[in-house]
Amino acid sequence: MGNREFPAGGGVEPVRIAMTAWTVLALLLVGLGAGWASDRDEATATVQVTSADHEVQEGYFSLGDSTTIMAKPGTDLHRFLVRQRGKTIRIAMSEADGRELSQIRR
């Protein structure tokens, strides 16, 4: 085994470019994976809001087939649910960060 010589054009430069490209690709995939992992702590549901007239006065609303929610009459949530009665809405649930108790986004 003697000295190995690279061709006159230089064989080291394409290897460096290839290694840099693979490193960038690996970092990109790791970043995307971390982004997808953070989305797993959230659940969304698309449901229809229903409620009889007497239930609205008491603050009871059915969300789809398996969920009932109670909202205190006169609150923002109650007014929102009254407006959405008979419509289909999407609900997103995730862990609260402690800085806000609830928020209705329009």
Image (cartoon, rainbow, N blue to C red):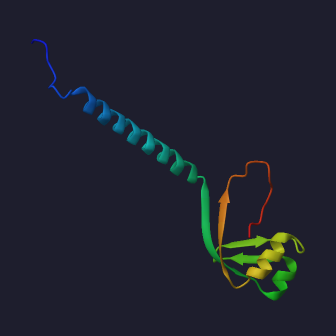
Displayed quadrant of residue 43: bottom right
Depth check: give the residue in front, 92 or 2: 2
Depth check: give the residue in front, 102 or 56: 102
- Furthest-front residue in this view: 8
- Furthest-top residue in this view: 2
Displayed quadrant of residue 85: bottom right
Depth check: give the residue in front, 59 or 17: 17
Q: Position of residue 5 (x, y in %)?
A: 14, 19
Residue occupying image coordinates x 75% and y 83%: 51
- Furthest-left residue in this view: 1
Residue 71 visible in the snapshot = no
For the N terminus, the quadrant is top left
Depth check: give the residue in front, 9 or 57: 9
Q: Position of residue 54 (x, y in %)?
A: 84, 86
Q: Position of residue 3 (x, y in %)?
A: 13, 13
Q: Is residue 10 left or right of residue 71?
A: left
Residue occupying image coordinates x 83% and y 82%: 56
